[in-house]
């Protein structure tokens, strides 16, 4: 193959390889119910699937992996379930942080910090602080996260700058809004995966998903393994992303 053709193929490969995958981890409760277990057992198995997803993302060279761990609406669940989800996050950070740091993973948390129990908040901040200089991969944990909340936070930040004269109305472009979201500095997700067969976004990354591809998979989150992740990425690679333009095939 000629060098130029090889180079072109490599470029296509890079374009088709997702840089950022975001996952709505759904189906823990149904996984447990199907086995006659309490819902909390589904969440515990869900943490194992989280570990495997982080490993697989690194293996596949996916630089950014965002996981929807706890939504701003999840507080409505029974107190014991909320307590278990908070406990699992704590255990995950305490047990896995050193390994993540050693492997060059930067941890970034998105979502509202206010209203979080102080021990959770300081653990999340400790994880961000310890790993802030890592470059290899980025694990974004969406915790107490809701996209509308995030957008309202960004609007408040921007409004403050307009009121104090730090910014003018003309400065408010889509890029400027990007810079005021919790995800500032993180590229938009190329691929959003949701497990458990539900076909909705549930207030997840609404702004950032403008041009994302979607994979709605039937498997329940605790069953989401390396093969399921690899299959979703392979399927993504076959898609023709046009970003409002026209197909590469038509254009050439
Ligand atoms: C949805 O399943 C899942 C959640 C609300 C929480 C996801 C949390 C984990 C996988 C574990 C903790 C995460 C980390 C990062 C340590 P569901 O309970 O809504 O399932 P259902 O729809 O079948 O009831």
Image (spheres, helix red, strand yellow):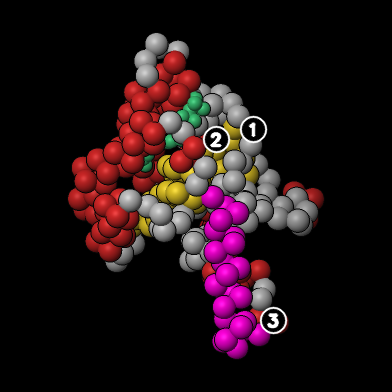
Name the chief secondary structure element in magenta: helix
Judge by depth and name the residue closer to the eye, 174 or 149: 149
Q: Which residue is drawn at 45% across and 24% down?
A: 29
Q: Crowding near pointer 3: few (<14 within 10 Å), some, many (20+)? A: few
Magenta includes 153?
A: yes
The alpha-carbon separation of the residues under discs 1 and 3 comes to 37 Å
Q: What stretch of residues is rendered in magenta?
A: 146-169
Secondary structure beneath dot 3 equals: helix
Q: Which mark is residue 142?
A: none
Residue picked out by circle 1: 199
Instruction: Please state, as top left, top right, bottom left or bottom right, where the C terminus lies in the image.
Output: bottom right
Q: Is mark 1 on a helix, strand or loop?
A: loop
Earlier residue among tags 2 and 1? 2
Residue 169, numbered circle: 3
The residue labelled by disc 2 is 194
Q: Can residue 195 be seen in this view?
A: yes
Locate residue 158, reporting x and y percent.
59, 74
Query: Does the residue at mark 2 contact the one at mark 1 (Cβ under 8 Å)?
Result: yes
Left or right of 79 in this view: 252: right
Disc 3 versus disc 2: nearer the observer: 3
């Amino acid at each position: 193959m000629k060098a130029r053709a090889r180079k072109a193929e490599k470029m296509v490969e890079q374009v088709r390889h997702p840089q950022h995958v975001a996952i709505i981890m759904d189906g823990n409760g149904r996984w447990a119910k199907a086995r006659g277990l309490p819902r909390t057992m589904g969440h515990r198995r869900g943490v194992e699937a989280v570990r495997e997803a982080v490993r697989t993302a690194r293996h596949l060279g996916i630089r950014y992996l965002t996981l929807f761990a706890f939504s701003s609406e999840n507080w409505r669940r029974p107190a014991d379930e909320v307590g278990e989800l908070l406990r699992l996050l704590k255990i995950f950070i305490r047990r896995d942080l050193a390994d993540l740091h050693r492997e060059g993973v930067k941890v970034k948390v998105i979502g509202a910090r206010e209203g979080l129990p102080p021990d959770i908040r300081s653990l999340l901040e400790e994880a961000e602080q310890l790993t802030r200089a890592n470059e290899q991969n980025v694990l974004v944990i969406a915790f107490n996260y809701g996209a509308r909340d995030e957008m309202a936070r960004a609007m408040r930040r921007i409004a403050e700058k307009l009121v104090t004269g730090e910014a003018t109305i003309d400065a408010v472009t889509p890029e400027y809004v990007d810079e005021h979201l919790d995800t500032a500095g993180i590229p938009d997700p190329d691929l959003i995966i949701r497990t458990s067969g539900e076909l909705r976004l549930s207030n997840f990354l609404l702004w950032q998903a403008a041009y994302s591809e979607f994979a709605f998979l039937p498997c329940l989150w605790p069953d989401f393994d390396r093969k399921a992740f690899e299959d979703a990425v392979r399927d993504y690679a076959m898609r023709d992303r046009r970003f409002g333009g026209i197909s590469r095939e038509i254009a050439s």
